[in-house]
Amino acid sequence: MPLPKTEYLSDSWKDGIFANKVVFCTGGAGTICSAQVRALVHLGANACIIGRNVEKTERVAQDIATARPGAKVIGIGSVDVRKLENLQEAVERCVKELGGIDFVIAGAAGNFLASIEQLSVNAFKSVMDIDVLGSYNTLKATLPYLRESASKHRMDSKTRGCTIGRPEPLSIVATDNPSVQPSPIGTGGRIIFVSATIHYRGMPFQSHVSVAKAGIDALSHSVAIEYGPRGLTSNIIAPGPIAQTEGLERLLPSDALEAYTKAQPLGRFGHVRDIADATVYLFSDTGSYVSGQTLVVDGANWRMSAGG
Ligand code: HXC
């Protein structure tokens, strides 16, 4: 049975805003990333999700496709994001079957609790490689298509009056003056890195992940600056404690769940829908001028923990 829309997307968004768009997502079989992709697919996109487990990734892809009749969702398992060739092959298949890549979500991550003394060099390196190198490889493999999408979209907005993704055509007059170019409505050439907040303050038993997430943040900022002139936007979504996710289950002992929930500033954990909604915002027309930013979706969790 298809998942009810309210489980992964709020009612604020209009159907069809991502028609003819393609999203490529690593870590796409995970709880958070699959909700992000499902929301985009619901709103018109086709998708390619990347995972390490073939059976799970294909099953999740089929499941996501039920979000919209006619949706095309490819699940490519056994991809190790640490290997650029693996990602390049997946990207080629995505482009061949879906026609391009407009949006990228770099969401693959590794995590476990371990003190600095317990961590072997290989354990530390494994998380760095999955998170940082994996995000870099995802960017590197998709960048030619993100650039193509951004430039195609710029042409569309200049010559066609920015109508893509809008129910009613807009009458925006194109001009050659770069300072008054129309906002690139219709969107394309956008990347979101899924990060965290733990490195803002430091967290015990998470040194490896904290270092990795700081690296991912720096990568996103660099993309925003280096490729902004090419029309790309790059942003970070930093989820806080999101209910029923593998990350939370791994990090929080079940007997601490109730007390920790009550201690949250909003008195509850987040929902995967909160992350999906943030994703829709950043990829939508509404997010056109947002780049180089971190959207923290944590109900003020990290400020509370930081005492701020
Ligand atoms: C200490 C550990 C360990 C553990 C693995 N290692 N698990 N060390 N405690 N619990 C060590 C191994 O002993 C090995 O070191 C090294 O890490 C590599 O492990 P492998 O299993 O050989 O590698 P690999 O198959 O690459 O797996 C890496 C992995 C992976 C990170 C451990 O299993 C994984 O990604 N698992 C979790 C996925 C996950 O949790 N996703 C959700 C992320 S949530 P030696 O020295 O023995 O060779 C998230 C949110 C972050 O990221 C925000 C939090 C607030």
Image (cartoon, rainbow, N blue to C red):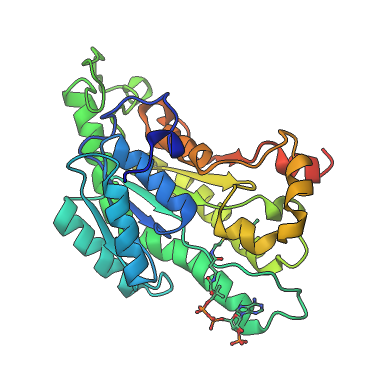
Q: Position of residue 58 (x, y in %)?
A: 29, 63
Answer yes or no: is residue 214 visible: no
Q: Position of residue 166 (x, y in %)?
A: 26, 22
Q: Is residue 73 left or right of residue 116?
A: left
Q: How many marks?
A: 0
Residue 119 drawn above or below residue 188: below
Q: Position of residue 280 (x, y in %)?
A: 41, 35
- Ligand 1 located in image quadrant: bottom right
Q: In the rendered image, which quarter is residue 126 located in? A: bottom right
Q: Is residue 307 left or right of residue 38?
A: right
Residue drawn at (65%, 83%) of the image: 121
Q: In the rendered image, which quarter is residue 71 located in? A: top left
Residue drawn at (76%, 74%) of the image: 115
Answer yes or no: is residue 40 visible: yes
Residue furthest top as drawn? 171
Residue drawn at (34%, 40%) of the image: 40
Q: Position of residue 245 (x, y in %)?
A: 56, 54
